[in-house]
Structures are given as structure tokens and as C-alpha cells.
Amino acid sequence: MTTTLFGAQWVHLAQCVLLTGAFFLLLLAGRPATDFMRHWEQRVLCWVRWYVIVALASGAVVLAAEAGLFEGRPEAALEPRAIWHAMLETRAGLLWALRHGLLIVLAAFLFLDGDVSTRQDWIAARGEAFLLAALALVLLGSSGHVAASSESPWPQAIDMAHLLGAGVWVGGLPPLALLLCGASQNVAAPDPYAVRTMQRFSRVAFITVLILGGSGIASAWLLVGGVAGLVGTTHGCLLLAKVAVLVLALLLAAASRAMLPALSSPTAAKSSAAARRMALFIAIEAGLVLVVLGLATAMTVTTPALHDDPVWPWPVRISLGALPQVPVLQRLAQLPIASVLAISGLTILAVAFLVRRQPIPLFGTLFALAASGAAIGLQPLMVQAYPTSFVRSPLSYTAGSIAEGMAVFQAHCASCHGTPTPDRATPTGWGSAVDLLVSETARRSAGDLFWLITHGRPSRGMPEFESRLREAQRWQVINFLRALAMGGFYSSGTSQIGAVVQPNNVWLVAPDVTISVGPLTPITLRELRGRRMVLLVLYELPGSRARMTELARQYGTLSVLGAEVVAVPPQSSPEAIAGLSEKPPVLFPVVTDGNEEIAAAYRLFAPGAAHAEFLIDRQGYIRAIWQSNQTGLPDADAVQAQVERLNEEKSPPALPDDHVH
């Protein structure tokens, strides 16, 4: 059924493109003033009548195939009830009905063949036909992947502009090849109207290709996401093939454009030969772009690269995480800024002086130096890669998954890697155990870790766990390792989260937690993003009683400032709030379920503290940490000052991803 849908969509798209381009070229050529141009126009009109018939027939097949896929039964494609349901009760079906209504009106215009004896009637007839064909074409962009990628109207507008540009350029090529082929048959010079049409189309096509390039890049940005999606997914590979074929078509277009002066040559034989060559080139170009339309259609029936797990095809990849370790950059960072500016200025002056004398050798040398420098400079950034290096974790980064991963790690991994503590992974057993907090391990992507856990490293004594752990358990271990690495990074002092909010210190993602308070409807930390800051408090009684009383007194002010206090005792209990003081009353939520998981995850960021507090901003990042055994607990006024500091931030950070990478 998918193959049938692909074939029907390809034919339907091609016919809509050809219809739009044919009428645009007729308008561009103008009302025919010679017998040759009138004969050409009639042949084009004969073509477009067949185009609209095939477009309607292929569209009917598309609707039937979509009905079969929608129902999950191939035989539903032949059931009127299922087809009617797919057309009237889905957004794609309603757009299909609108598009085919326009095509039916266009067919009526074409087959009624009204009077176009006057110039105004001719322009009105051709203009209305072009508008109907163009509207039918751009409506295809309302139900594509780009339109579904965002609620904003801009992606949909980009896709529509891309389709309209394809219609104007691609659809105009076959009738233009027919025009030039007929013009080349003339023993005299080609018809001047044909020459003028080619010149006009060349200028319009140049602008259209620029629009196609810009809208295509924007669409790829929305649907591909990066290099991994481009080279590691079916959608990305189809896009690469589409670009490759399109480049060949553009080379032919450039060759045709270069022959424009010969088309206007005063020598009849030379101009006719140029017209024949241009007709051949344009016909081949039209064939190539029809292949491009097929590849574009294939992309519509595949999962967008952004939402697919890429399979990385090469054994290495570039990791920007290794950038600070590049020796050259480390040395440049040690130079005074004045020295760097002086060296840069002298280099620019030398280039400006030499480029006037020997530009070609100079630029050749500069290119060679730049290429050599890039090859040498990129080498330290190359890290080992695996097929799953860019696979996204299907599990969200939550306190529950971290706690589950910790349990799995203790049961299956601690015997070799050691029982991890928040500041080091203490290896026991094998002497070759890997320190899980060294920079090399911490820089590995989640996909790298998944491959290593799944397949093991036999050369280093690590067994495979594909047969021992479920896939979800392996991802839970990775979530735990990420939290463990962040906890070790925090305690290392390299980039600390301290007691004072730092404007640019935004990196420590707060694991999502479910805030369950007795019989009330649970809410997650993620649901508070964009609305409230959170002061997450891990407390133990009786040691934390005075602090909890202080927070209860200050809660009204903190709440007005946009901060929610969430208290988490060490054990789940429906009576948790009863253990706190009644005066002043505790009005903030006290978690009664899932406490052990929350405490296990967040204590990785506050090792050994009986009482710890985490100030989480509205985007979901931990911005300040207070713990009873290290920084000490500030008074409530100091906590309020840090909340006010977050409120004063002018450019809040972007929302964090809910999955580790």
C-alpha cells in the first residue's frame, strides 16, 4: 500500500507542477502574435488537458491508498465508506477535497475552451488557469512534514513557497523545450517571440532557483536537524540524492543560459543550432527534475530525519566536547588579548599588501594553509563513533529513571566499575576498570554508551549486556551515568553550581520529578517550566525542623516572587506533612510518593548532605545548591535574594532537552 501511495503521489505532484509551470510559461510568453506561437500554444493546451485528467485520477488513487493506511486494512482502499471517512474526517482529506475541487474547476475551464479573441480575455483565461493550478499545487504543502513540524504558520509558508517555485521552474521546462525544438526547425532565424520567451524564462528561473534553495535549506533545517540525520537516516539519504540530481539539473540550466547569446545570433544556422542544443539540454533537465520530484515524494512517505534514529555510517565523528583540550587553542587562550589582536592585525596588513601583487599564488597558498590547518586542527576533535552514536534515548531524564539505573548499575556493573560515589567512581575488582568520571568517558554521547553497554568491549574485559538487560534498563543506566558525571563535574570545581546564582552558569539540568501530594492530582517539574521557579528541598527530621519552619514563614513571599517550594522527606509516607510543625502552617507541597527516587537522584548533586536545597529556574536548570555539610544553609532572606536575581535575568536560557545526548 505504501508503494501504491508513493507512486500515486509522485504522479499527482508531477502533474500539478507541470500544470502550474505550463500556464506560467504561457503568461510569460504573452499572447501569441505569429502562427508558430499560436500552434505552440495549442499543443501546450492539449498537454495540460491531459495533465489535469491524470492529476485527478492519481489524486483519487492517493485518497484510496490513504484510506487503506488510515484504516490499517488494504481492502479499505476499495470501500466507499472508508474513503468517505478519510476525506471528510481528517485534515489531509479536507485539503484533498479542496485541492481537487480546484482541479475540477480548472478542467472545466480547459474543456469549455472559452473565447479568447481579445487580449483581455486571453490574459483573464490564462491568469485564472494559472491561479487555480498554483493554488492546487501549494495546498500540497499544507499536509506535509514541514507543516506538521510546528504550529507556527512559517514552516507551512516555506513549504508552499518551495512548491510554487518548483511549479514555475520545473513545470515550465517541457513546454519551453517544445518551443525551442519547434523554433529550431525554422530555416530562417528562430521566431523572435520564442527567443524573447527563453530570455524571460531564464531570468525568472534564476530567481526561482534562489527561492528554491533558500526554502529547501529552511525545510531541511526543520526536518533533518544535523549531519547525523542527513547521512544516517533514509529521509536524509533521499535528501542527499535529491540535491545530487538537482545539481546536475542546475549545471544543465547554466549551460543553457550560457547559450542565450548564440540564440540571438544574426546567423540563422548558428541560432537554429543553439536552439536545438538548448531544447535538448532543457528536455534532459526536465527529466532530471522529475526524478527530483520522485525523490521529494519518497521523502514524504518516510519518517523525517529529526524524528528517526540515525545509523552513523563512519567509525569516527567530530566532538566539540574535546575542543578545550586542543593544544593550539590552549596556548592561544594563554596569550594576552593584546598580543592576539596585534598578530591578527599584522596578518591582515600582510595579506592586504601582497594580494595586489600576486593574488593567484597568494590565495592558493592561503587555501593550502587553511586546508592543512583544518586537517590538523580537526584531528584532536575526532573521536571513535558507533552506529548508535546519535541515537536519542527513548527515556526521559527523570529522577525515576536515574534511580532505576542506579539499581541496575549496582547489580550488574559495580563489581567491575566499583560502587560509585558522587565525587569519584571507586573501581574494585579488575585493575582495568574504567573511571566513569574521567573526561573521555563523560564526553561520550548517550548513543556511544548504549552501544558499549549493548555490545561490550571484549578487548577490555567488558561483556555484552544485550542478552542480560532490557533496552529500557540500558537507557536507565545511561541516565544514571549522566547524572553521576554531572555530580562528579559539580564537585570537581571545574564549573561549580554554588550558593549564588551565576548569570552564565547554565548547564546542570534538573531531572524531572513527579510531585505527588496525598490525594491531589500529581504534577511534574516539567509542567512548571515557563511558569514557576522551584526550590526543591531534601530534608530529614528532626535535624531540618528549624529550617522547614523558616521556609514555611517565608513561603508567602517566595510564592509571590514566582518560586514554588517542594519539600521531599527521605521516605514515602502519606503522613509526611504531619511530621512538620503546625505553626506556622506548611502551605507548600510535601511529596508523599516516590520520595526515595527523588532523593537518590538529587543527592548525586549534593553528596553526603542530610539537608540539601536546589534552586531550579523556570527553564528547568539547577542554578544554586545549598547543603548543610558544605556551603551551609543561607537564611531565608538570602534565598529570596537569589530568587529575585533569577527574576532579573533579561535573556533566560533555552529549555533543556528531556533526553540525554
Image: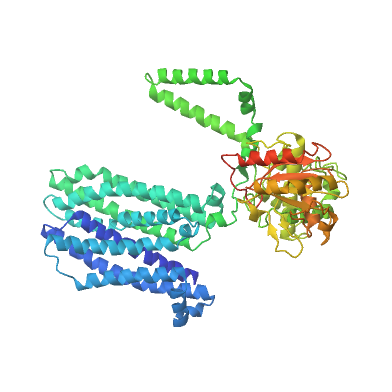
* Residue nearest the observer in this picture, 467 or 640: 640
Position of residue 242 measured from the top left corner of the image (x, y, whole percent):
43, 54
The colour scheme applied to this rendered structure is rainbow
* Residue 365 percent location from the top left of the image: 46, 25
Q: Identify the residue at the far front of this view.
A: 583
- Residue at the image point whose x is 41% and y is 60% from the top: 141
| Residue 343 to residue 270: above or below | above
The answer to which image quadrant residue 87 occupies is bottom left
- Residue 327 locus on image (x, y percent): 65, 28
Please tell me which residue is depicted at 18% across the width and 57% down the height of the picture. Answer: 182
Q: Examine the rendered structure and indicate whether residue 156 appears above or below residue 48.
A: above
User: Which image quarter: residue 331?
Assistant: top right
Give how far across and how far down residue 550 sits, in percent: 79, 45
Instruction: Return the residue nearer the eye: 456 or 203.
Output: 203
Asked if one can make out residue 463 in the rendered structure from this viewpoint, the answer is: no
Question: Residue at the spot x=42%, y=51% of the render?
Answer: 216
Say which residue appears at 66% left-offset and 35% top-offset. 502
Can the viewer see residue 117?
A: yes
Residue 181 vertical placement versus 268 (above, below): below
Nearest to the observer: residue 452 or residue 204: 204
